Image (cartoon, rainbow, N blue to C red):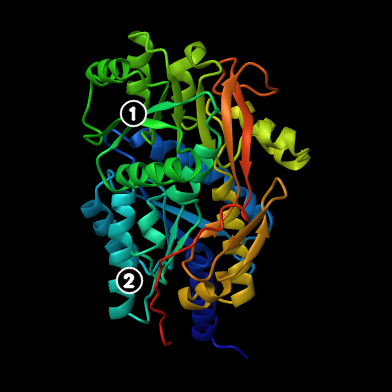
């Protein structure tokens, strides 16, 4: 016969097991840290990407997550400052989170590559894998490449090749204006490289770097562009630095093409509006009209659902591809151990939602993916940011087209 003490102890144990069940379930998620700006002048970008990731995490979790576990998004604010990103990385490693994403700022990306590499060398039992979803400077998968970084976004060089390929034959004079930090310098260098390679008939009539995130009035830049006789302004500026530039250009009546790298993101279409008709272009991973062109029904339906609840466009197809490939790699590895997942990611092939091939190249951990150049026009099925104008595809570069040489000399871990 069971004694009263034993019955009390059994009841206490049962109560404790029930009490402890919730934390155990929460701890059993696969945590992915997300470091980006959620305060400061570029916070709108981080906030928008966070909304996108919440939708994409729900999508991948609805497909079963990985290893029977759900993905959990854990945001950290870096204010777009490398020092703040490294503080966030310390918090990530303190919490034993195995994966960290970062999508804005090549200066931050360079700091994280170095920080993650040093941490992993010192702490082989608490490694972390850096999933780069938008630090784009070409150098990051060339001379600054690292085994622990996987870039799930096209490099500046890949974008520049698409950008110059898409310029109209009528353009003979261009003005380059870019942000004065690693990304903007990479845009400048690769744009000049591909102008010389693909369009030697084009004259560069201006080439400037501007303070990153500090210029409030772009009228002096617009005056110089006007005086140069340029037919096209080629710029890698994004977010506030692009939107304020375009606003000043429209206000000053600058009659040039705006051939950008990132105008399709967060406020660019709204900033230029009707003034950009048939003269604003951008290089993008996706637009709803790409899905129409490729008869990709599932992708088009995803865009339709997105548009019902958001004022901005869904264009970051690479974010979706990244989570899909991570899901596949974790399941393939049978583990969330960063080394095992890294090895499973190498040379992984996957088709994106529009059916195009994506390849994670082993040599430099650069995702080889397609790009689409689009021009801003009324002649499309889906408009952008409710402006009445949307992106019509004028040039396509496949992953095979953008399999460019790399100078990466990667040091691989021995165990």
**Label 2 belongs to which residue?**
117
State the SS at label 2: helix
| Residue lying at 30% horizontally and 45% vertically, measured from the top left | 185
Residue that appears at 28% across and 44% down: 80
User: Foreground residue, 267 or 241?
Assistant: 241
Answer left or right for 14 relative to 109. right
User: How many numbered discs, if any?
Assistant: 2
154 above or below 4?
above
Residue 368 makes an appearance in the image: yes
Q: Secondary structure at mark 1?
A: helix
The quadrant of the picture occupied by the C terminus is bottom left
Looking at the image, residue 346 sits to the left or right of residue 243; the answer is right
Quarter where residue 348 is shown? bottom right
Q: Which residue ends up furthest to the bottom in the rendered image?
A: 1
Where does the image place residue 394, in percent across and percent down from the top left? 62, 31
Q: Within the image, what quadrant is residue 296 found in?
A: top right
Task: Write down the residue under mark 1.
Answer: 240
Left or right: 120 as drawn, with respect to 219: right
Q: Residue 177: x, y in percent?
A: 31, 31
User: In which quarter of the view is residue 290 placed?
Assistant: top right
Q: Residues within 10 Å of mark 2 (few under 14, many from 20)?
A: many
> Along the polypeptide, which appears first: circle 1 or circle 2?
2
Whether residue 355 is situated above or below residue 17 in the rendered picture? above
In this view of the protein, which residue sits in the foreground, 306 or 297? 297
Q: Residues within 10 Å of mark 1 (few under 14, many from 20)?
A: many
Along the viewing direction, whichever of 233 and 136 lies nearer the viewer:
233
Q: Residue at x 29, y 56 (%)?
A: 88
Residue 316, given in percent of the width and then of the height, sits at 54, 42
**At x 41% / y 50%, what residue is drawn?**
136
């Amino acid at each position: 016969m069971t004694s009263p003490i034993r019955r009390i102890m059994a009841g206490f144990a049962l109560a404790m097991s029930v009490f402890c069940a919730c934390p155990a379930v929460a701890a059993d998620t696969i945590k992915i840290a997300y470091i980006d700006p959620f305060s400061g002048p570029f916070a709108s970008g981080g906030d928008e990407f966070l909304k996108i990731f919440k939708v994409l995490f729900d999508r991948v979790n609805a497909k079963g997550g990985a290893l029977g576990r759900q993905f959990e998004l854990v945001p950290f604010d870096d204010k777009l400052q490398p020092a703040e990103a490294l503080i966030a990385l310390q918090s990530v490693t303190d919490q034993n989170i195995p994966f960290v994403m970062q999508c804005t700022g090549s200066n931050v990306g360079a700091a994280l590559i170095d920080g993650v590499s040093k941490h992993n060398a010192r702490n082989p039992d608490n490694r972390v894998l850096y999933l780069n979803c938008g630090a784009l400077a070409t150098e990051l998968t060339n001379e600054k490449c690292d085994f622990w970084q996987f870039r799930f976004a096209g490099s500046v060089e890949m974008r520049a090749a698409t950008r110059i390929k898409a310029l109209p034959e009528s353009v003979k004079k261009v003005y380059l204006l870019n942000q004065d930090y690693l990304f903007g310098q990479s845009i400048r260098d690769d744009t000049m490289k591909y102008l010389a390679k693909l369009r030697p008939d084009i004259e560069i009539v201006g080439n400037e770097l501007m303070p990153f995130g500090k210029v409030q009035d772009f009228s002096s830049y617009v005056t110089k562009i006007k005086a140069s006789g340029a037919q096209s302004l080629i710029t890698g500026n994004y977010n506030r630095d692009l939107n304020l530039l375009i606003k000043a250009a429209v206000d000053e009546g600058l009659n040039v093409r705006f051939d950008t790298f990132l105008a399709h993101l967060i406020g660019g279409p709204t900033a230029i509006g009707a003034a950009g008709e048939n003269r604003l272009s951008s290089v993008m991973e996706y637009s709803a009209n790409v899905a129409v062109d490729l008869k990709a029904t599932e992708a088009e339906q995803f865009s339709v659902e997105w548009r019902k609840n958001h004022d901005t466009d869904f264009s970051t197809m690479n974010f979706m591809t990244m989570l899909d490939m991570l899901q596949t790699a974790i399941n393939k590895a049978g583990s969330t151990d960063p080394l095992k997942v890294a090895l499973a990611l190498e040379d992984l092939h996957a088709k994106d939602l529009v059916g195009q091939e994506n390849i994670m190249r082993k040599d430099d951990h650069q995702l080889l993916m397609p790009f689409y150049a689009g021009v801003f026009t009324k002649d499309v099925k889906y408009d952008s940011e409710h402006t009445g104008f949307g992106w019509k595809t004028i040039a396509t570069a496949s992953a095979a087209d953008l399999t460019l040489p790399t100078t990466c000399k990667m040091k691989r871990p021995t165990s």
